[in-house]
Amino acid sequence: MKFFIDTANLDQIREAYEMGVLDGVTTNPSLMAKEGIKGTGSQQKHYVDICKIVQADVSAEVIATDYEGMIREGEELAALNPHIVVKVPCIADGIKAIKYFSGKEIRTNCTLVFSTGQALLAAKAGATYVSPFVGRLDDIGEDGIALVARIVEMYRYYGYETQVLAASIRNSRHIIQCVEVGADVATCPLSAIKGLLKHPLTDAGLQKFLEDYKSING
Ligand code: E4P
């Protein structure tokens, strides 16, 4: 399973990249706003800075919600750097735009997906990635991981090449659940990635090894 980091924070992206386990980055307008990146020019530069750090897939989201606007913005974003993946919302014009981008070999991430029906349309339009939002479904008492599992099963059954990118991941347990249901990618906050390392037996074992080493080597 590929690991993407879900942030626009350059320090966190660098830290995850330096761990050697990072396969890409996802951003969204809320994450860009959190970093205080204002204006189209600064935002475009920020996407390029992220691409330069990771040299791997970086999802950059369109703001337009109409077909022509999405095409214009998506083409501009895709021209910034070969690593850019154009993120498009799962609405009717978005599906149409994904179909257009797929014909132009511009890679896409169909975002804000909350049902298998939406994931079916994204795959039929030729999306590179589909992003079911796990945490936001859990927040309203639904089962986000079960949706990821249903999409994985549907794509395998019909042979769709669209990759299932589990988004809105909130913790390390979600990551393990994504592995268990066969998600292609999980996009996660840095804390959830680092959380995978934590185990009290690792800490206790390491402490004992170091103590025993010191007891004979001073
Ligand atoms: C990434 O592609 C999504 O936009 C992101 O994972 C949403 O996460 P949130 O539900 O924590 O805002």
Image (spheres, helix red, strand yellow):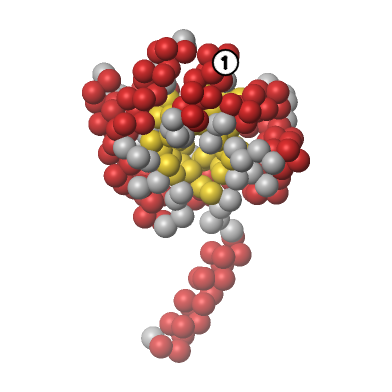
Total numbered circles: 1
Q: Is residue 47 left or right of residue 121?
A: left
Where disc 1 sits, the SS reads loop
Decide: is 81 above or below 1: above
Q: At 56% across and 52% down in the image, what residue appears?
A: 196
Could you tell me if residue 87 is visible in this image? no
Extreme residue in the top direction: 66
Label 1 is placed on what type of residue?
Ile
Q: Residue 89 location, x and y as percent?
A: 52, 20
* Displayed quadrant of residue 139: top right
Pick the front one: 120 or 47: 120
* Displayed quadrant of residue 184: top right
Query: Quarter holding the C terminus?
Result: bottom left
Q: Is residue 81 left or right of residue 153?
A: left
* Displayed quadrant of residue 73: top left
Q: Residue 26 location, x and y as percent?
A: 45, 35
Extreme residue in the front direction: 103
Extreme residue in the bottom direction: 216
Q: Is residue 43 left or right of residue 147?
A: left
Dot 1 surroundings within 10 Å: few (below 14), some, or many (20 or more)?
A: some
Q: At 37% across and 41% down in the image, what residue appears?
A: 83
Q: Which residue is mark 1?
A: 91
Pick the front one: 104 or 36: 104
Decide: is 67 above or below 44: above
Q: Residue 84 location, x and y as percent?
A: 38, 36
